[in-house]
Structure formats: structure tokens, C-alpha cells
Image (cartoon, rainbow, N blue to C red):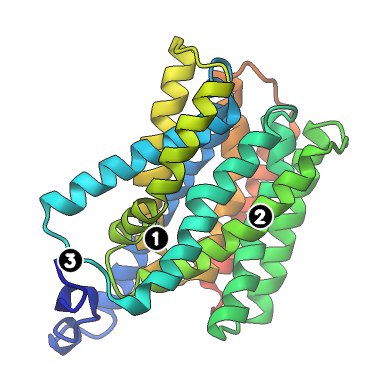
């Protein structure tokens, strides 16, 4: 495989094809929104899956094993499809993707979930869309409209108010991990969204996973010698879902969606993620929600609709 292969560079063939004005762009936007929404749905199950995994597996072992398993799956796909190695200019952004979404966010949130409930963790995760939009504006020079920012802030405020109420308004030391996860994940999303305009989204996360494989393989070997490791029904399901669903498939559709509709708009779909997480928590973890849940969900959906229509 060679880094100079044309598959790693943007092609101009697609833009030379004649299409009915507005049709292709509209269809692409709808498809991108659907893909990003599927990514959000996959991510919303991450915290419950992590909680299950922690029932039998230590936090460091869980994080390194999930990343290593995801890398093996991604590597197999890349080899089977004879995907060329990315060019030199792509490796720095891929390193940011790896540091943010492969290592940083999973590790910090897993450490937080040792002492935090999924509802409490959702307080900070609810700020991820706004944080990603800010990173995108700083990194790419994008300038979303005032209506976009107003809706984004309103949606973030609604999510925070709801999740804080669900957790009783208490703050724990786990918030330090979660705030760090917020920043590093937003950076990874932004760089991944930019790269997904030049190569397929699944290749972005695939190469990010491969880049981090040596670190995670060594980390898993060390962690397994010092932490408990018991494969129960829950811990096995949690490990497999976090490795396949969250770490690979979810990011594949997420990056492809971001490439189609833009990082700022795609990030606002994540305003629904904390609420989805709480719904899954009812069924999977036995948590109970108050009547505020449907009201907050309606408010968030309105905010998402505004951000999708606002010029970004």
C-alpha cells in the first residue's frame, strides 16, 4: 500500500456530473443527517454499556481492550478492501482523532463512571455539541449564525437543567474527568469531521484505531495483570458493544454524517444523546425518570430543528 495512492486524495469526478439543481445537495443533507443521528443513537448506549462492562472488568482493562478489539476489526476491513495508507499530511489529524475519540474520551468517561451515575455523566456530555461547534469555529473558521448559537445554547441549557435535576444537583470529583473528556473529544470530532471530507468516514476512525493499537495493546497487557477481569453476561455485552458499536460502527456513520452536513450542525444532534442515554438507562440499568423527561425532550427537539435550519 502506498501513501501516494489517489484514494487518499479528494476526487473531482463527482462534482463534474450534471445533476438537477438542489436535488443532490438536499438528498446529501438528508442522508448526512440520518447518518449522524444513527451515530448519536449508537453513542447514547455507550454509558450503559460501560456500566455493564465495569461490573466485571477494571476501567483500564475495559478501555484498552475495547480499543484493541475495534482496531483489529478496522484493520481487517482495511486489509480486505486493500485501502491504501493515508498520505503524510493526514497523520497529524489522525493522531488528534486517536487521542480524542479512541483513547481520551473512553478512558476519562470510564474512570468517571466508577463513581458517577449515567445521569450525572450526561450533565457534562450534554455540553459536547456546543463544545464541538466552538472547536470547529476556531479550527475551520466557520461562522454559524446568531440563530444557530442561540438555539445551541438553549438546547445545551435544557439538557444540563434536566440531567442536573436527575442527579439531584450534586457534583462529584468525576466531573474533572468528564470536563477533560469533553475538550479532547470535541477536538477529535472536529479533526475527524474535516478528514471525512477527504476520505470515507470509516477509514478515518479505522486509521485512528490502528494508530493507537500499539499503545492499547501494551496497556491491555499491563492492566490485565493488575485489575480484575471477569466475563459475565453484562461485562461481555458491555465490552463487545463498546468495542464494535460505540468505538467503530458508531463513529463510522458519525464522521460520514459530519462530512455531509458540517461539524457544527451535526454536533447539535448530540443534544438528544443525554436524553437517549437516560431512556436506555431505564431499560438496562433500572433507573427511573421523572415527568420532566418528555418536556425536556420536546424542548431539545425544537432546538435541534432550529440549528438544522439555521445557516452554519
Q: Residues within 10 Å of mark 1 (few under 14, many from 20)?
A: many
Q: Is residue 282 left or right of residue 101?
A: right
| Label number found at residue 47 | none
- The residue labelled by disc 2 is 182
Q: Position of residue 140 (x, y in %)?
A: 53, 82
Which secondary structure, mark 2? helix
User: Real-space Cα distance between discs 2 and 3?
Assistant: 32 Å
- Count the numbered circles shown: 3
Q: Residues within 10 Å of mark 3 (few under 14, many from 20)?
A: some
Q: Quadrant of residue 205?
A: bottom left
Q: Residue at x 69, y 55 (%)?
A: 127
Q: Position of residue 41 (x, y in %)?
A: 46, 42
Q: Marks 3 and 1: which is nearer the front?
A: 3
Residue 303 visible at all: no
In the picture, the quarter occupied by the N terminus is bottom left
Figure check: 269 above or below 13:
above
Q: Is residue 270 left or right of residue 150?
A: left
Which secondary structure, mark 3? loop
- The residue labelled by disc 1 is 255
Figure check: 46 above or below 298:
above
- The residue labelled by disc 3 is 84
Closest to the observer, 15 or 140: 140
Q: Is residue 112 left or right of residue 90?
A: right
User: Real-space Cα distance between discs 2 and 1?
Assistant: 17 Å
Q: Marks 2 and 3: which is nearer the front?
A: 3
Q: Residue at x 69, y 57 (%)?
A: 155
In the picture, the quarter occupied by the C terminus is bottom right
Amino acid at each position: 500500500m502506498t501513501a501516494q495512492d489517489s484514494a487518499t486524495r479528494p476526487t473531482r469526478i463527482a462534482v463534474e456530473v450534471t445533476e438537477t439543481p438542489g436535488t443532490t445537495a438536499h438528498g446529501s443533507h438528508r442522508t448526512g443527517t440520518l447518518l449522524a443521528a444513527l451515530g448519536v443513537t449508537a453513542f447514547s448506549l455507550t454509558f450503559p454499556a460501560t456500566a455493564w462492562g465495569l461490573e466485571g472488568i477494571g476501567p483500564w482493562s475495559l478501555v484498552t481492550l475495547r480499543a484493541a478489539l475495534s482496531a483489529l476489526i478496522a484493520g481487517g476491513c482495511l486489509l480486505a478492501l486493500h485501502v491504501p495508507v493515508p498520505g503524510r499530511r493526514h497523520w497529524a489529524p489522525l493522531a488528534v482523532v486517536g487521542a480524542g475519540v479512541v483513547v481520551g474520551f473512553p478512558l476519562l468517561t470510564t474512570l468517571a463512571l466508577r463513581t458517577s451515575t449515567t445521569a450525572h455523566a450526561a450533565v457534562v456530555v450534554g455540553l459536547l455539541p456546543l463544545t464541538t461547534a466552538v472547536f470547529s469555529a476556531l479550527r475551520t473558521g466557520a461562522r454559524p449564525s446568531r440563530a444557530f448559537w442561540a438555539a445551541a445554547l438553549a438546547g445545551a441549557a435544557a439538557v444540563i437543567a434536566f440531567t442536573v435535576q436527575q442527579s439531584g444537583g450534586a457534583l462529584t470529583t468525576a466531573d474533572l474527568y468528564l470536563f477533560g473528556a469533553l475538550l479532547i473529544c470535541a477536538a477529535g470530532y472536529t479533526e475527524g469531521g474535516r478528514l471525512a471530507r477527504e476520505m470515507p468516514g470509516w477509514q478515518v476512525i479505522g486509521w485512528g484505531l490502528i494508530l493507537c493499537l500499539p499503545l492499547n495493546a501494551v496497556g491491555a497487557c499491563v492492566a490485565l495483570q493488575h485489575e480484575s477481569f471477569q466475563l459475565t453476561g453484562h461485562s461481555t455485552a458491555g465490552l463487545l458493544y463498546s468495542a464494535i458499536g460505540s468505538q467503530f460502527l458508531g463513529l463510522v456513520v458519525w464522521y460520514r454524517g459530519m462530512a455531509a452536513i458540517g461539524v457544527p450542525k451535526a454536533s447539535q444532534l448530540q443534544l438528544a444523546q443525554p436524553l437517549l442515554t437516560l431512556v436506555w438507562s431505564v431499560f438496562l440499568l433500572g433507573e427511573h425518570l421523572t415527568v420532566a423527561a418528555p418536556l425536556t425532550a420536546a424542548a431539545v427537539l425544537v432546538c435541534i430543528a432550529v440549528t438544522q435550519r439555521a445557516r452554519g
